[in-house]
Amino acid sequence: MVHKFFCFALLLLGSQAFAQNLPKPSPAQLAWQQLETTAFLHFTVNTYTDKEWGDGTESPSIFNPVKFDANQWVSALKAGGFKMCIITAKHHDGFCLWPSKYTDHSVKNSPWKNGQGDIVKEVADACRAQGLKFGFYLSPWDQHEKTYGTNQYNDFYKNQLRELLSNYGVVHEVWFDGARGPNAKDMQYDFQGFWSMVKELQPQAVCFSDAGPGVRWVGNESGNAGETCWSTIITAGMAPGVADSKYLNTGDEKGTEWIPAETDVSIRPGWFYHPKEDDKVRSPQNLVNLYYQSVGRNSLLLLNVPPNREGLLCPQDVAAIKEFRSILNETFKTNLAKSGKNKKLVDNKLSTWINAPEKAAIEINLPKAATFDRFMVQENIAEGQRIAEAQLEYWDGSSWKLIKNFTTVGYKRLLRFDAVTASKLRLTVLRALAPAQIAEVGVYKASMKESEK
């Protein structure tokens, strides 16, 4: 008996020691993940040329959003439940949506507001006024700037980055897109210098590039995080723009760095506004599906909603995101497990949790028999991501029946399945990297609108 107890104690101490070494999110990463849904705003000269990628030769004279209204953008996004706006301050064409001191290729040479306007400022101010967080996209690839391809370009880019980090209030995300065309000049970006500047001037901000350092690309633009999605990866040898998309999609359970996935996707086929796509806006139901495939798989949904040539979000886009949020609110308004015995699992706090040893089932009792078809589980990710495999079952009155086997949980896992009626379920962690810490569970019946066409 003493021998068995000694072995168990050693095993427990070993797992606790391993748990202490698990990668964990920074406070900024933890806050970012809990935003769940954020919005991209792709807007530049491409909006007027009907292109996706400009070439840097566009005249600023074509940029004239005569009805531009940042408050309309932010109000619509807020109604859609989005918690942050990220504006394309400079895309690959090099045109700047703010009056940069370091180039003439900007709004200061456009007819909009007689060259006195600043899109970035108005978006940042609207976000602040309406309680949304603010971020910006600053393309490293610049087809207009003549110093691109030389070491001097890194200084030019840092000057522009400093302007955006210093003059627009608090910034919560900075996007460093690694994309560039096949015929682009060879350019070695000083990413370490860029990221250091963000850390110095906006320490609460997370930095996006294909492989971090704050958050990573999910590996596609179709709105799908991996069915298995770890927040951890190994970045050694992974340069922005060349990182393996399959690896980024699933992450790595052996990863040594906490760099969670961001799922970026557009509400339209293109990233910029095109009149021919006015009838191709994703339906609210399609957007809900994207939510399950991103937020519901331990990622964050970054949805692009492109302003039109007048400088407004289109009515059909606005209606789609509003109904998207309405459907989600209806599905998740009533947690059928709320009256259960374990209050820590239904208090909407990741910081309260229960241990879930491998193979030891957690029984979830409902106040009475109910019909449900959605299940939510969250880990206490402040202490790392631990669950590798798990299963969910329900009691049919005489035996336990399998609902679904699944893999990673992380910040949030959402399961969809055919409706069942039961008064209790059980969740079993089958394999974990360290003793699992279950923070939240939810049992729901989906809105009828989820399946409407």
Image (cartoon, helix red, strand yellow):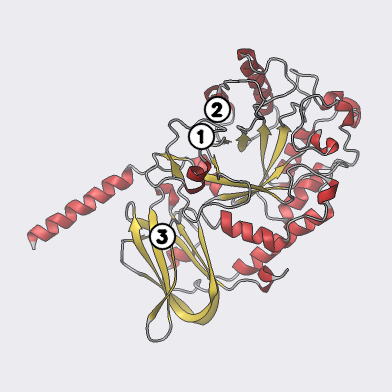
Circle number at residue 343: none
Horizontal relation, residue 324 to residue 193: left or right: right
Q: Can you say which quadrant of the picture contains the N terminus? A: bottom left
Q: Could you tell me residue 375's position as x and y percent?
A: 51, 68
Distance between the alpha carbons at the discs numbered 3 and 1? 27 Å
Which residue is painted at 52% across and 24% down in the image?
Answer: 192
Disc 3 secondary structure class = strand
The answer to whether the residues at label 2 and label 3 have Cβ atoms under 8 Å apart is no
Disc 1 secondary structure class = loop
Which residue is painted at 58% across and 71% down in the image?
Answer: 334
Q: Could you tell me residue 284's position as x and y percent?
A: 71, 61
Crowding near pointer 2: few (<14 within 10 Å), some, many (20+)? some
Disc 2 secondary structure class = helix
Q: Could you tell me residue 291's position as x and y percent?
A: 61, 57
**Amino acid bearing label 3:** Ile
Circle number at residue 438: 3
Q: Can you say which quadrant of the picture contains the C terminus? A: bottom right
**Amino acid bearing label 2:** Trp
Crowding near pointer 1: few (<14 within 10 Å), some, many (20+)? some
Q: Could you tell me residue 205's position as x and y percent?
A: 58, 36
**Of marks 3 and 1, which one's residue comes earlier in the chain?**
1
- The residue at which mark 1 appears reads as 213
384 up-or-down from 147: above or below: below
- The residue at which mark 2 appears reads as 195
Horizontal relation, residue 248 to residue 177: left or right: left
**Amino acid bearing label 1:** Pro
Crowding near pointer 3: few (<14 within 10 Å), some, many (20+)? many
The answer to whether the residues at label 3 and label 1 have Cβ atoms under 8 Å apart is no
